[in-house]
Image (spheres, helix red, strand yellow):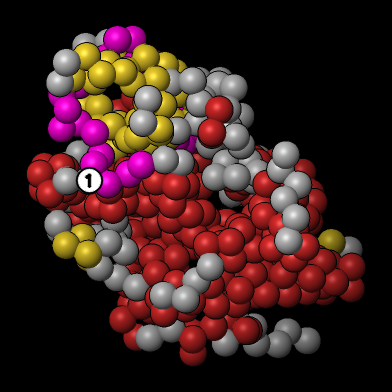
């Protein structure tokens, strides 16, 4: 006997009752964009290691999701929850798509919006919100990922100018960016600089041969005596707290985004299990399959409830940034476990690009690591619970 089923696993948790009509409408618009523009092509893009990022940026700008949680300068000024649910739908398409939006809005645009001069904001933010200009965020270095305080990129004064030397690594959007937000060590501490594409001495070679985030532009940034005027520095950012606050914005999007990838895996797997016949019965009718699907649905729902709570705290202005570590740790850890289990339920079909599950699983290997590894977030939580720092 076949019983009625919810439209999705998270519908079972009644999450729609936790968001307002405007937020649901915006989420549906992003879902429609992903269904129309991303799903028909993303498997091919992934296989080819390609993303039409510039075209997509303009379309995403028209959709209003670039820097959507920021106010003014052409940004939509939505709630944190609305931004999170947009990330959920974008990553249900592909982690590379959500990364494009996150780096543009939560890293590059946020850095300029929060720490830039009025002239810098006027020059860059309206064009970036429209997708007419693309930004990247240069913090990670080849030898300094989890410990950005050890960065070797330096900026020295030369008259009224700054001269930058160094290398950044694993930079999303780097080789297509019109402007790079680059963090460097100075005699006065760590400062941020806006480096326009085409500046002499600045190059951004693309990183290839990736097995994860293949539908995403990933680059190295090389700064070889890059000379910038004094007004290229972000005036309101001093010390490591500047870039770390930007990372918190991006991590917040991941709290929701990773669950979007998990949701797409589970939705696909439930559909497959309901249609796949084994010994004259649907795969979904077997107890072993239902036990797996039930556990995955439970973890997905719990993760989304936590994400929505974190979003509500952020909107209320009461969020402790360390609470984002709870969400990032839980969402990515559960999402990758769900993706792997879904791959097993699909059997051999699960390893092909005919289904999105293996693609999501491979992408989530990167999401597990960037914006703070799971171990880093575990130690943040451990420090909160014990009062002792275990980082050094």
Q: Which residues are magenta?
A: 214-238
Instruction: Choose top left, top right, bottom left or bottom right for residue 386.
Output: bottom right
On the image, the x and y values in percent for residue 339 come to 69, 53
Q: Which residue is mark 1?
A: 116
Res 91 visible: no
Instruction: Choose top left, top right, bottom left or bottom right for residue 229.
Output: top left
In the depicted structure, whether residue 12 falls above or below residue 179? below
Given residues 26 and 265, the one toward you in this image is 26
On the image, the x and y values in percent for residue 180 come to 30, 31
Given residues 253 and 296, the one toward you in this image is 253
Given residues 298 and 172, the one toward you in this image is 172
In screen coordinates, is 151 left or right of 340?
left
Q: Secondary structure at mark 1?
A: loop
On the image, the x and y values in percent for residue 365 come to 65, 41
In screen coordinates, is 250 left or right of 266?
left
In screen coordinates, is 125 left or right of 101?
left
């Amino acid at each position: 006997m076949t019983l009625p089923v919810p439209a999705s696993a998270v519908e079972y948790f009644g999450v729609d009752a936790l968001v307002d009509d405007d937020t649901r409408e915006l989420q549906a618009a992003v879902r429609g964009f992903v269904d129309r523009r991303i799903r028909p092509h993303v498997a091919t893009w992934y296989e080819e290691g390609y993303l039409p990022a510039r075209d997509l940026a303009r379309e995403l700008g028209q959709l209003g999701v670039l820097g959507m949680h920021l106010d003014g300068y052409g940004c939509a000024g939505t709630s944190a929850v609305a931004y999170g649910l947009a990330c959920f739908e974008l990553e249900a398409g592909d982690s590379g798509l959500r990364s494009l939006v996150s780096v543009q809005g939560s890293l590059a645009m946020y850095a300029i919006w929060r720490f830039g001069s009025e002239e810098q904001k006027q020059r860059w933010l309206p064009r970036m919100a429209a997708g007419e200009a693309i930004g990247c965020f240069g913090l990670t270095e080849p030898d300094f990922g989890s410990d950005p305080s050890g960065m070797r990129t330096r900026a020295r004064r030369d008259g009224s100018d700054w001269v930058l030397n160094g290398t950044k690594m694993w930079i999303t959007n780097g080789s297509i960016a019109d402007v790079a937000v680059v963090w460097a060590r100075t005699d006065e501490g760590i400062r941020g600089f806006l480096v326009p594409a085409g500046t002499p001495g600045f190059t951004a070679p693309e990183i290839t041969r990736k097995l994860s985030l293949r539908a995403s532009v990933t680059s190295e940034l090389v700064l070889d005596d890059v000379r910038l005027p004094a007004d290229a520095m972000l005036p309101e950012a001093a010390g490591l707290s500047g870039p770390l606050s930007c990372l918190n914005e991006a991590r917040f999007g991941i709290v929701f985004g990773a669950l979007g990838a998990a949701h797409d895996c589970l939705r696909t797997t439930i559909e497959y299990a309901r249609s796949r016949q084994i010994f004259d019965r649907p795969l979904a009718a077997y107890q072993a399959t239902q036990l797996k699907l039930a556990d995955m649905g439970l973890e997905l729902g719990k993760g989304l409830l936590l994400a929505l709570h974190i979003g509500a705290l952020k909107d209320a202005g009461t969020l402790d940034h360390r609470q984002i570590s709870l969400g990032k740790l839980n969402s990515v850890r559960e999402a990758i476990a769900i993706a792997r289990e879904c791959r097993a339920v699909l059997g051999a079909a699960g390893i092909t690009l005919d289904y999105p599950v293996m693609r999501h699983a491979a992408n989530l290997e990167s999401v597990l690591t960037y914006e703070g590894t799971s171990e880093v977030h575990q130690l943040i939580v451990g420090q909160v619970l014990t009062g002792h720092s275990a980082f050094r």
